[in-house]
Amino acid sequence: MKTDYAPTKLDLLDLEELACKITGLDYDEIDADTSVIEDALCAEFGIELDGFVDIVNHLLPLIDVGKSPITEKKYKGFSDQKSCWLAKIEVK
């Protein structure tokens, strides 16, 4: 898949902590055991750590925050960085 942006490369430890957060693991409690993190990702999402890292690195450049000029509501989500939201939720 060709993209018009350069994926961000994050620190692997940060991504492991993010994986723990979304799978309900305590990073310190599991002593940062990568195999436990990978097992949890596979069980919860059917994806290995390498795939998770790749997806996050591709999604990060699309994260945006903005305010609707019509409703004045604030949103966060993924956008094409030009003028179109791809997916968003309201920020309260």
Image (cartoon, rainbow, N blue to C red):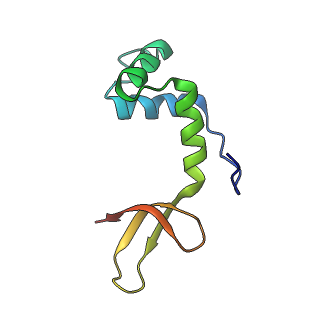
Residue beneath the point at 67% across and 45% down: 1
- In screen coordinates, is 82 left or right of 33? right
> Which is more toward the observer, 24 or 45?
45
For this orientation, the residue located farthest to the front is: 1
Q: Position of residue 36 (x, y in %)?
A: 42, 14
Residue beneath the point at 60% across and 54% down: 61
User: Could you tell me how many numbered marks the image carries?
Assistant: 0
Q: Position of residue 58 (x, y in %)?
A: 60, 45
Q: Quadrant of the C terminus?
A: bottom left
Q: Position of residue 32 (x, y in %)?
A: 46, 18
Classify 86 as above or below 82. Answer: above
- In screen coordinates, is 83 left or right of 71? right
Q: On the image, which quarter does residue 74 sit in?
A: bottom left
Q: Position of residue 29 (x, y in %)?
A: 35, 17
Classify 57 as above or below 89. Answer: above
> Which is more toward the observer, 92 or 28?
92
